[in-house]
Amino acid sequence: EFVLTQSPATLSLSPGERATLSCRASQNLGSFLAWYQQKPGQAPRLLIYGASNRATGIPARFSGSGSGTDFTLTISSLEPEDFAVYYCQRRGSWPVTFGQGTKVEIK
Amino acid sequence: QVQLVESGGGVVQPGGSLRLSCAASGFNFNVFGMHWVRQAPGRGLEWVAVIGHDGNSIYYAESVKGRFTISRDNSKNTLYLQLNSLRAEDTAMYFCARDFNIGWVDYWGQGTLVTVSS
C-alpha cells in the first residue's frame, strides 16, 4: 500500500519566519507530487505541482523541492494568510493518495 | 472563470442512498477529467473517484468501490456521484474537483455535506 507521510503534524511559527514542511513517500514518485493549502471552511487550493512548479497565482514565497521519496514545501516568510493546513498528494497511478496534512499555526 | 457547484448532500440513514451533482462552468467541461474528494469532519482529504473526460476511464478508492458510482453528462456540464449502502464513516464534505495532469486537482468546488446518521 502506498503511503505519504507528512511531518511535522503541527508547526508553530510566527509571521515572518520560514516554514519547512516535509512529505515522504513509501515508493519512488519521481516528481509526481503536488502540495495544497486548505484554510478552515474552504476548499483546498493547489500550490505546487510536479514537486517544484508553482500553480497559477501562487506567490513566490512558496517553493517546492525534492524528488523520489523526499519532498519539501518551503514558505520563505510566513504571511498571516499562510496559517493553514497543507497536504501533499501524489499522481501517477490510482488510487490518488494524500498525506495526512501539516497544520501551520501561529505561535 | 472556472466554477464548480456541488449539490445533493444531506442527512441520510445508514444503508441509504444519495446522488450528488456538480455543475461546472467557465471551462470546456468535456475535455477534462473530474474527481470527487471527501473530507470527514476534522480529518484530512480522501480521494474518492475519478472519471475521464469522455466517461470511459473510471477509478475508485477501495473504501467506496462497489457502493459509489461516478458519472458525467457532458451535454449538461454536470458530474455526479451516486452513493449507495451508506455508512457512518461516509459522513464527510464531498468536493467536486477538476483534474490536472491526470491525478492532481487545479480547481475545487466548495463542497456538499453528507451526514449518515440514524
Image (cartoon, grey):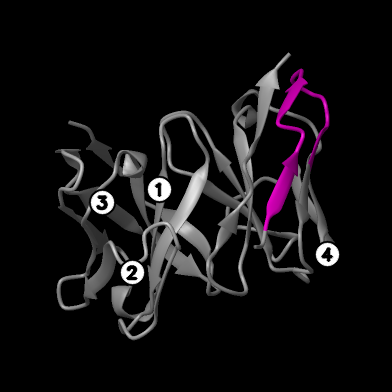
Residue type marked 1? Arg
Mark 3 or mark 2, whichever is nearer to me: 3
Q: Residue B5 has which mark? A: 3
Residue nearest the observer in this picture, A95 or A67: A95
Give the residues in magenta. A3-21
Residue A8 point in image, percent of width and height: 77, 33
Report the chain holding disc 4: A
Q: Earlier in the sequence, mark 3 or mark 2?
A: 3
For label 4, the residue is A67
Q: Residue B38 has which mark? A: 1
Asked if the residue at tag 1 contacts the one at tag 3, i.e. Cβ–Cβ closer than 8 Å, the answer is no
Mark 4 or mark 3, whichever is nearer to me: 4
Asked if one can make out residue B110 in the rendered structure from this viewpoint, the answer is: no
For label 2, the residue is B27
Does residue B9 appear to the left or right of A23 in the view shown?
Answer: left
Asked if the residue at tag 2 contacts the one at tag 3, i.e. Cβ–Cβ closer than 8 Å, the answer is no
